[in-house]
Image: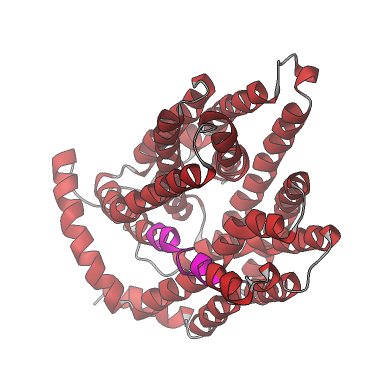
Amino acid sequence: MLSWAFYDWANSAFATVVMAGFFPIFFKRYWAADLAVTDSTFWLGVINSSASLIIVVSAPLLGAIADQAGAKKRFLIGFTVLGVLACGTLFWLAQGQWGIALAIYLLGVLGFSGGNIFYDALLVDVAPPGSYERVSALGYALGYLGGGLLFAFNVVMTLYPSWFGLADSAQAVKLSFLSVALWWSLFAIPVVVWVPEGPRAGGTGWMLSVSGGLRQLGATLGQIRRLQITFLFLVAYWFYIDGVDTIVRMAVDFGLAVGFEANSLMVALLITQFVGFPAALAFGRFGERWGAKRGIMLAIGIYMLVVLGASRMDRVEEFYLLAVVIGLVQGGIQALSRALFARLIPAGQTAEFFGFFNMVGKFAAVLGPLLVGLAAALTGDSRLSLVPILLLFLVGATLLSRVDLEAGGEAIRHRLNP
């Protein structure tokens, strides 16, 4: 259980240090310094969208093949190696090599996102159904703590490079990328060595597994349509996680638009990371005792209050307060969503169904940013730009309220024992 959860500690360093922290800024100011700001933003957006599209298209099929071959851990290892090598390679790139930097970053994002499909799917192999919420939350909690610790160290190294014998902050940032690669590879060892994997569902050879995976993928599309409760949850998840991801992705831009300093935004990000550690654990206990659905509904309600608070914010202290509140619920809503979905999928098809789960997640933050941009343009007030996200949370909560877990479990049992 702990070995499984430590993979979150391992790969969250990439999400925090590289994706959310240093890469976007370093790309603009170092590798793409000669490009116009609008051009560098365009190409970074293209790469992020391309990575999401590749995962959206491939995740369900890869999951089906992994289930057929009993290869969830092997796929996890493969994507981890890809991410680690890509992240480490960023250390060696010289100024001006923006095209190569983007290509390598794309591989890193694919390694991170692809690995999560099979990491999520292993949840049902390491925890009994009654402990899904607690174990899932433990993973997210360790992810927040591990990613936050390494990010804090790298921020200090970047602000005071001479303390570490480094020439400048650019060298410190490049060393931060290398540190993520080492961190990710080191703490991925427990899941590789000690986490068990359930038996394969299909053929004994890879060709049979691929052909079986293709057949199973088509069958699963039909299953999802017939498993109405599972399908309803996926739709609800798409709406509310779109709101969550929009806040995550737009928070820095929102803070800058309101007029806060970049250093203040880094402090807010660290606050969210460290508050997220105990809060995710607490949400796991809440979900285990009161149910994942109630925990998610609570988190959605708090997110709606965050959006309303942001619409009236004008001091950096208020931004820090919102960072604390987001840290209280961000890991919890993610962990409980993963645990709830694990209760609504058939045994033996976990990687495939979590492939669909991750596919829906990658489609998230599509509608939300568009609503934010339109609101900012129409109102001319950055503080009001997040208000339309309330609609996403409201629709998500309404659909989630109709998810009957008992009926969903019964539908799965009926499918397995017609």
Does residue 4 sit above or below 303 in this rendering? above
Q: Residue at x 52, y 54 (%)?
A: 127
User: Looking at the image, which residue is at 37% across and 75% down?
Assistant: 231
Whether residue 405 sits left or right of residue 50 in the image: it is right
Helix, strand or loop: magenta stretch = helix
| Quarter occupied by the C terminus | bottom left
Q: Is residue 226 magenta?
A: no
Q: Is residue 210 left or right of residue 63?
A: left
Number of callouts in the render? 0
Q: Position of residue 149 (x, y in %)?
A: 72, 38
> Can you tell which quarter of the image residue 85 is in?
top left
Please report the bounds of the magenta region as a residue range: 357-371
Percent across and percent down for residue 160 are 79, 25
Coloring scheme used: secondary structure
Is 262 situated above or below 360?
Answer: above
Q: Is residue 338 above or below residue 179?
A: below
